[in-house]
Amino acid sequence: MLSRRLSRLISALFLLAICATLVVSAQETNRRGRKYKAPAPNSRIEITILRAEDDKPIENAAVIFTLVGDKGNMELKTNEDGKTMIDVLPTGSKVLLQVLAKGYQTYGKDYDIDKSQMSFEVKLKRPSKQYSIYEKHPEAAEGNGADKDKPADQDGAAKDAPNGAAKDAPKSDPPSESANQSDSKPDASQPQPQ
């Protein structure tokens, strides 16, 4: 019984010595190569994609991560709950998050990954109407119809218009005396309004 324990102990020590020899020899062969550098710790990021109008999840939205200053990107799709998760982004990095979903405006924003666990909620809006130069816009339609970019002469007509009158603009009255005085230099003899 004592001899069995002794033989087991000797066998264990022999195996331990062989393992130590292998580790030392592996380190010696690795001296010529690069030193082992531990990878940077990664962050776990959870993203939820919702509709802006009613906060319902958007399924199958493309969530794209691009590390700033790095080539390439990583794309994930959202599940039926509008969620996706990534855990390979290094902590301390900066990432561009883009979200693409059919029927919604594209979302994009830079984020600093500074915690080991983070979560983002993105609310996507429906596309808005595009601005058209062919439609009338009430906020831009101020004035009498003459071009605002073209200077007007004393009759109020645009200078480039034929015969000194604007095509569709009605003729305006000549400017009053007070308007002409405001363009000239102030009279120092009279008190000026403050």
Image: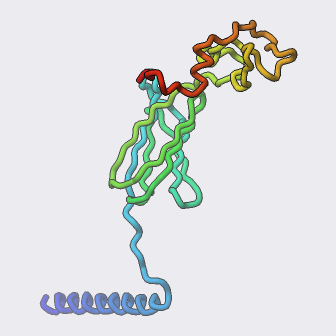
Q: Nearer the viewer, residue 69 or 25?
A: 69
Whether residue 179 can be seen here: yes
Does 152 sit left or right of 16 as displayed? right
Q: Name the residue at 53% across, 43% down.
A: 98
Give the percent coordinates (x, y) of residue 17: 30, 92
Q: Name the residue at 75% across, 7% down.
A: 171
Give the percent coordinates (x, y) of residue 60: 54, 35
Q: Quadrant of the C terminus?
A: top left
Whether residue 63 can be seen here: no
Residue 122 lies in what quarter of the image? top left
Does 42 sit left or right of 180 as displayed? left
Q: Nearer the viewer, residue 152 or 99?
A: 152
Q: Quadrant of the N terminus?
A: bottom left
Q: Name the residue at 43% across, 46% down.
A: 85
Q: Name the residue at 70% across, 26% down.
A: 149
Identify whether 37 is placed above or below 103.
Answer: below
Residue extending furthest front? 189
Identify whether 114 is placed above or below 175.
Answer: below
Q: Nearer the viewer, residue 18 or 49?
A: 49
Residue 36 lies in what quarter of the image? bottom left
Colouring used for the render: rainbow
